Amino acid sequence: MANEQLLILIKPDGIRRSLTGNILDKLSQLRMTIIGAKVVKVSRELAEMHYYQLKGRPFFDELLDYIQGKIYGESWNKILAFVYQGEDAISKTRKVTGVTNPEEADPISIRGAYGRITTKGVYENVIHCSSDSLEAEREIKLWFKPQEIVKDIYAIKRIIVDKEEKVVWDL
Ligand code: IDP
Ligand code: MG
């Protein structure tokens, strides 16, 4: 079994419907540890980079509006971002999360219990989690700076910007 880390996002619908506690409770059953956590206002640029593989799909623009909370109004542009670590963390989290389509997800999974499809066809599936370790690395480096994570998980480098030293991911 591998010790893995992954990115987990509680999407704007999860926050709006006050599901944070319920979701974290289900995740805590997996005995992973949190090594990074923050609230993020999602820019269009960040949304596009996060979902770059889905560019060109018919639901892409709606997906960007959804992950930025725009479909609920400007004040709902916030998500909670976590880096979790644990043995086989990715497959365990994917299982408790459930499949992408909330109507097809196991009813006791997070998406099955709390997700829905809106009348406009948006999958409100309340949570994102990385699907494999390569995706996890790309996503964690996109959402978090090295100093926002309490463990050394990927290589870093020190650079000088405006005469000040900065620690960044060594991509
Ligand atoms: P995942 O979140 O289960 O890994 P992906 O295929 O990576 O699923 O898709 C990313 C996100 O894009 C989904 O969580 C969902 O929000 C949205 N999405 C994917 N497929 C569809 C679709 O067919 N209709 C509407 N939204 C979709
Ligand atoms: Mg995915």
Image (cartoon, grey):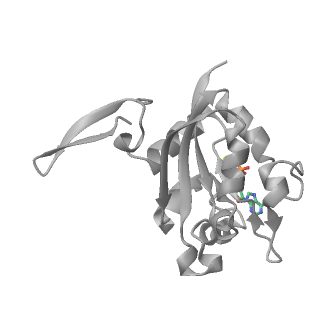
Q: Is residue 13 above or below residue 149?
A: below
Nearer to the camera, 18 or 134: 18
x, y (%) of residue 138? 51, 41
**Residue for point 50% across, 68% down:** 44
**Residue for point 67% across, 34% down:** 90
Residue furthest top in the image: 1
Q: How many marks?
A: 0
Image-quadrant location for residue 76? bottom right
**Residue for point 53% across, 45% down:** 139
Q: Is the N terminus in the top left, top right, bottom left or bottom right quadrant?
A: top right
- Which image quadrant shows ligand 1? bottom right
x, y (%) of residue 100? 78, 52
Q: Is residue 13 above or below residue 32?
A: below
Residue 101 visible, this orientation: no
x, y (%) of residue 149? 42, 40
Nearer to the camera, 133 or 35: 35
Q: Is residue 147 above or below residue 133?
A: below
- 55 lies left or right of 74: right
Residue 143 visible, this orientation: yes
